[in-house]
Image (spheres, rainbow, N blue to C red):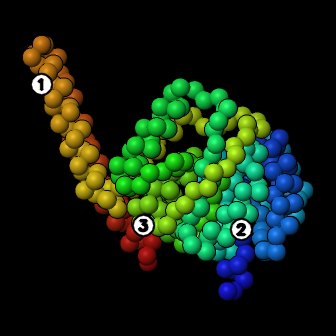
């Protein structure tokens, strides 16, 4: 096994995490120094306006700074592009994960393509809406990938570089982890989960659950349209039939409302069909240029 195979590159995306990044790096360096594995730590500052960059630069690690904020996913891809090892790990800069968990993942990578930390949310305060959205997300992923995914957007995971071959389809925002998980399932990669502890973050969260959930839903449809188009079209037909049923039911009671809903429904179906075609053509064009 050559050097690029046996080493580990740990990527930490950071945006305005001056209060957490120093503590995370201290713990991570202490943990990795106990192992005999070669490693590097890459902090990607995604255009922070605080002292994140200055704090990370005090450590003997690789630091990269985006001139402006481009997103969580873009930061991970930047780190991967600058990583010298084939084996990659990602963690967060807010001290929500225990660095010791990475040690458990390393031997598992001899068997699996990706190992994901399944977070224990026991005792964590979660809004009821967040719980509902996560439950719906798991059901949608189960339908499209035929795999149960206990924690699709966990930010602590390990994987090989080659899993980023589908990067043109990945989200550049907070949905990156969900997109890479779904891509792994859709391309028949071996994915495994290990239970991990999850701690309250240092600083403020940048996640917007409703906005990011909508983005994730669009992302799932996009990935499935490329890799499992029949699943996507079947879902489209089901939604269409439900819409027709609701329109017919409304028509029995109120004709004017039925006419209005029919127009809206036809418009939505027409635009979604055009969207499917445009997306497929766009992905074909992107793939051709990428392969060149």
Location of residue 110 in the rendering, given as x and y in whole percent from the top left corner: 61, 74
Quarter where residue 147 is shown: bottom left
Mark nearer the viewer, 1 or 3: 3
Q: Quadrant of the C terminus?
A: bottom left
Location of residue 29 in the rendering, given as x and y in whole percent from the top left corner: 85, 61
- In the picture, measured across the screen, residue 175 lies left or right of residue 22, that is left
- The extreme right residue here reads 58
Front one among 287 and 114: 114
Secondary structure under badge 1? helix
Secondary structure under badge 3? loop
| Label disc, if present, on residue 262 of the rendered structure | none
Front one among 276 and 220: 220
Residue behind mark 3: 188
Q: How much space separates mark 2 and mark 3, taking CA atoms? A: 24 Å
Classify 10 Å Cα crowding around label 1: few (below 14), some (14-19), many (20 and above): some
Q: How much space separates mark 1 and mark 2, taking CA atoms? A: 57 Å
Q: Is residue 236 above or below residue 223?
A: above
Question: Which residue sits at x=77%, y=68%?
Answer: 40
- In the picture, measured across the screen, residue 269 lies left or right of residue 42, that is left
Q: CB of mark 2 within 8 Å of CB of mark 3? A: no
| Label disc, if present, on residue 248 of the rendered structure | 1
Question: Which sits earlier in the primary sequence, circle 1 or circle 3?
Answer: 3
Q: Is residue 286 above or below residue 125?
A: below
Classify 10 Å Cα crowding around label 2: few (below 14), some (14-19), many (20 and above): many
Question: Which residue sits at x=63%, y=38%?
Answer: 121
Location of residue 175 in the rendering, given as x and y in whole percent from the top left corner: 53, 47
Q: How much space separates mark 1 and mark 3, taking CA atoms? A: 41 Å
Question: Which sits earlier in the primary sequence, circle 1 or circle 2?
Answer: 2
- In the picture, measured across the screen, residue 200 lies left or right of residue 170, that is right
Question: Which residue sits at x=61%, y=55%?
Answer: 194
Residue behind mark 2: 9
């Amino acid at each position: 096994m050559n050097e690029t195979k046996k080493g580990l590159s740990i990527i930490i995306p950071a945006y305005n995490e001056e209060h957490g990044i120093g503590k995370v790096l201290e713990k991570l360096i202490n943990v990795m120094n106990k192992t005999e594995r070669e490693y590097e730590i890459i902090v990607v500052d995604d255009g922070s306006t605080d002292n994140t960059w200055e704090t990370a630069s005090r450590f003997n690690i690789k630091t990269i700074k985006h001139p402006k904020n481009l997103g969580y996913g873009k930061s991970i891809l930047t780190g991967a592009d600058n990583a010298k090892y084939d084996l990659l790990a990602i963690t967060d800069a807010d001290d929500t994960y225990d660095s010791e968990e990475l040690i458990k993942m390393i031997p598992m990578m001899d068997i699996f393509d990706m190992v994901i930390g399944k977070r224990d949310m026991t005792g964590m305060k979660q809004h009821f809406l967040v719980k509902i959205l996560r439950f719906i997300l798991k059901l949608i992923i189960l339908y499209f990938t035929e795999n149960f995914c206990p924690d699709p957007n966990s930010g602590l995971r390990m994987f090989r570089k080659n899993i980023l071959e589908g990067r043109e389809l990945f989200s550049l925002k907070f949905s990156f982890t969900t997109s890479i998980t779904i891509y792994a399932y859709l391309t028949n990669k071996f994915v495994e989960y290990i239970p991990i502890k999850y701690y309250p973050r240092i600083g403020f969260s940048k996640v917007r659950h409703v906005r990011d959930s909508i983005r994730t839903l669009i992302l799932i449809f996009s990935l499935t349209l490329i890799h499992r188009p029949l699943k996507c079209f079947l879902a489209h037909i089901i939604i269409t039939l439900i819409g027709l049923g609701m329109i017919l039911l409304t028509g029995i009671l109120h004709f004017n409302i039925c006419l209005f809903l029919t127009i809206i429904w036809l418009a939505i179906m027409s635009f979604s069909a055009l969207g499917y075609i445009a997306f497929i053509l766009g992905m074909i064009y992107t793939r051709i240029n990428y392969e060149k």
